[in-house]
Image: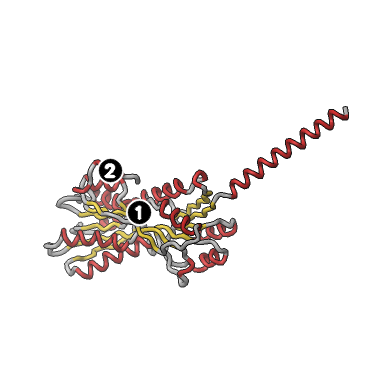
Amino acid sequence: MKRKIACLLTAIIYSVFILTGCAKQETTEKDDLTVIGMSQVGAESDWRQADTASMKAVFTEANGYRLLFDDARQEQENQFVAIRRFIQQKVDYIVVMPITENGWDAVLKEAKDAGIPVILVDRMVNVKDEDLITAHVGSDFYAEGKKATDWMKEKYANAEQVNIIHIQGTKGSTPQIGRTAALDDAVKANSKWKVIARMDGDFTEAKTYEVMKEYLSNRDTLPQIDVVYCENDNEAYGAIKALEGFGYTCGKNGVSVISFDATYNALVYCQKGKIAMTVECNPLLGPLVESVIKTLKAGEKPEKNRYVEESAFRPEDITEELLASRKY
């Protein structure tokens, strides 16, 4: 009997040893993962959803990462909370898509004091100490806007007056600031251009439809509209829906709707002529963010700002091959 008990105890001890060893090995393997804390703006547009998908496709456990993903739901305060949580969790890197540019000094200093590099994606922040930011990956939004206004200058070279409705994106965000500045500079340089209305579309189709509908509803007579300058594709969809609801034609011999992002659906709208010009803003930034992290892990210094190359499209540029190759 004693011998049976001794054998049983030996078996139990051996089992505990094996299980403990396995658990320790599993923990070690997980500890080898590079932990990324990521705060995304939200899911307000096709572009944003494609950007999130790009990040999640790169930062997988199979690729050696553990991604702690936070959706800020369009609230900057939610981003501050998420970043402070990432600091407490002692992540290796913090990746942020800032909703607006201002108000970041305090929370980013906390990250710097904790020794955690901060990488900005898509948008920028306005901080006194530039060292709070390790690197930025994204687009040159002013250059995007200039592509659109250069096209407008060519199209309306002989026009006596160009009436423009401007639908802005989220106020204070980097794309809104850059794309708005490009239009403002072009209006100043072209005396025949006139912004007859400026509205806040917040980068969404629904809000743009409502503000455009309200604007047109409150007019005694419908105005002559030559251009609607929308600061992303989703705003363009809302604007087109509202304009057509009031009898406007969008496209050739009608209103020229301009959009930014050039997602698949926007290219289809452009092919059909409803969007006159769509300027590309590439959301597939995951690989570029990973390249920054790999540079840092190698003990090297990454570029402070890395801009992606982008194109612009008119209806005649849209081919079936282009649509088939579009990944967002």
Nearer-the-camera pick, 70 or 56: 56
x, y percent for residue 303: 41, 63
* Count of marks overlaid on the render: 2
**Depicted 268 relative to depicted 186: above or below:** above
Name the residue at 20% across, 54% down. Answer: 255
Q: Nearer the viewer, mark 1 or mark 2?
A: 2
Dividing the picture into quarters, in which one does residue 169 lie? bottom left
Quadrant containing the N terminus is: top right
Q: CA distance from mark 1 to mark 2?
A: 27 Å
Lower sequence index among marks 1 and 2: 1
84 sits to left or right of 286: right
**Where is mark 2, residue-wise?**
323
Look at 19% across and 50% down and name the residue there. Answer: 251
Identify the residue under disc 1: 207
- Where residue 289 appears, as percent x and y from the top left, is 43, 55
Q: Residue at x 52, y 65 (%)?
A: 107
Mark 2 Cα within 10 Å, few/some/many (few <14, many 20+)? some
Q: Position of residue 54 (x, y in %)?
A: 41, 48
Residue type at tag 2: Leu
**Side (left or right) of 220 relative to 105:** left
Q: On the picture, is 167 further left or further right than 125?
A: left
Q: Which mark is residue 157?
A: none
Circle 1 SS class: helix
Q: Residue 232, image x and y in percent? A: 32, 55
Residue in the foreground of this view, choosing between 171 and 131: 131
* SS label for mark 2: helix
Q: Residue furthest right?
A: 2
- Count neighbours of disc 1 (C-alpha within 10 A) and say few if under 14, some if 14 to 19, many if 20 or more: some
Look at the picture and state if 63 lies above or below 101.
above
Residue 209 visible (yes or no): no
Tell me the amino acid under the disc marked 1: Lys
